[in-house]
Image (cartoon, rainbow, N blue to C red):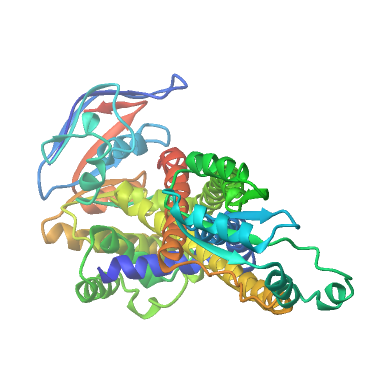
Amino acid sequence: MIKFNQVHKRYPGGFQALKNVSFEIAGGEMVFLTGHSGAGKSTLLKLIAGIERPNLGSVLVNHQNVGVLKSRALPFLRRNLGIIFQDHKLLFDRNVFDNVLLPLQICGFEYRESHKRVRAALDKVGLLKRERSNPIALSGGEQQRLCIARAIVNRPSILLADEPTGNLDAEYAQEIMAIFNAFHQVGATLLISTHDESILQNAGQRVLALKHGELQT
Amino acid sequence: MRHALAQNIGIFRRMFASPIAGTLNILVIGIALSLPAGMYLLLQNAQGLVARLSDTPQISLFMDTDTKADDVDKLRRQLEQHPAIDRVEFIPRAQALEQLKKSTGLADVIGGLQKNPLPDAFTVYPKPRTAQSLDDLRAELAKLPKVELAQLDSEWAYKLEALLKFGRMLVLILASLLSLALVAITFNTIRLQILMQREEIEVSKLIGATNGFIRRPFLYFGATQGLLGGITAWLIITLSLLLLNYQLGALAHLYASRFSLHPLSLGDSLTLLLFSMYLGWLGAWLSVARHLSQIEPR
């Protein structure tokens, strides 16, 4: 599903974010990405989504080399990914329902089908009753769940989450992890970055640890 | 399809969220377009007038005031046999005076004259000719005995036509400049819209929106703004024409004539609307091409 082959990433300022990173994630796997802030977790996820490109090495997603993908092809790669952003990236000029609807509009879904899917996604994250609210009125945990609903509404095969429990207290974090586990159960591939040790221990899944841009083994 | 519609309606609602700014933009576009289009319309009307006059060129021959009746008959026969002349009309001086009284409303002034100052005259209708040969004919007729003056009546029409050519060039320059202004207005409006919706564009790109998908509503917006501007221009021209014709009607009535300005034809109206729509679309396209690539998610 996802394969990194000796990937190096250096930012224009000269900061070396990733050094010689190689790993492979099989379909249906749930993998955690850990490391201190600045260790390169976000950069790694951005390379998968084609937001950044590697300087050296190759990033394969669904057998496509993301690093050399034409920018015209990028949107279609991203439609197969559900991305949960650290800063949520919700749109506050529309309500909860329309936030989740956006990916389906982009893919050109049929009207009735898309409305059904939005409700299903909101139901999964427990926000169905808040569909007419503005995201600004939601709590931090609810905003995070809304972001998840938007990421999964398109039923992507790969889910990327950047610090999904970063600013949440333990109870909310548990809820979020329960949602992720449910996706894992139905066969989705998940890559979740976190620095929360308790989550890693509870999950009991494979862990990729980054330190100063290098993968620890 | 319904999605595209819903999405565009949503974006339209947000774009027209500031109705005053939006209306002002449309008004500016409308006024900018109505100037060249209105001038074009006036030229069209003048053109119609000229075409009517220069279609049937005539040469007026004014006789010496002391011409006798048999001189006139001799000249008439001579003219009727001339190969370049289609037909001839004789206007006796008394009739000419009557006509003058009737058509200009100067009856009082003319009535005060002690004797008829007008000469006998012929109106000569030549066979269809080029402007040059008409002038040759006029010169030839001027040399006939007892002819005081030969005047090519359509001459001023040709002069006017040359003037109209100048006017058309002026309209073309004005239209080009103001079209450029329209494109610039749209370019700037769309730039502001893009900046205002920066976040939405960024998020949309992140979740798989193609550039076409992001571009589309802006192009629609530009085209709609252009079209509304075009409609405004059309309304300005049509209303102005109504007002002008109202005044012109009173004026023409005084001169006992029925002259009025023709409105924009259906074809010209459609051209105006399509052109303004296209310019709006073009401005939006340029703006989107310039500014959208600068918004890449990070």
Q: How many marks?
A: 0
The residue at 39%/52% (across/down) is B203
Where residue B230 appears, as percent x and y from the top left, is: 51, 62
Residue at 10% in and 46% down: A27
Residue B37 at least partly seen: no
Residue at point 42%, 47% (across, down): B285
What residue appears at the point 65 percent right and 63 percent down from the top-left corner?
B69
Which one is nearer the viewer's eye here, B189 or B148? B148
**Residue A16 image position (x, y, % from top left):** 38, 22
Relative to A209, is A171 above or below? Answer: below
Outermost residue toward the front? B70
- Report x, y in % for residue A79: 22, 51
In the rendered image, the quadrant that contains the C terminus of chain B is top left
Q: With B220 as the anchor, is B104 left or right in this view?
A: right
Residue A177 lies, in percent from the top left, at: 28, 59
Direction from residue B175 to residue A184 in the image, left or right: left
Residue nearer the viewer, A11 or B294: B294
B207 up-or-down from B290: above or below? below
The one of A188 and A214 positioned closer to us in this rendering: A188
Question: Which quadrant of the view contains residue A184?
Answer: bottom left
Mark yes or no: residue B57 visible: yes
Q: Quadrant of the N terminus of chain B?
A: bottom left
- Where residue B90 sits, quadrant-wise, is bottom right
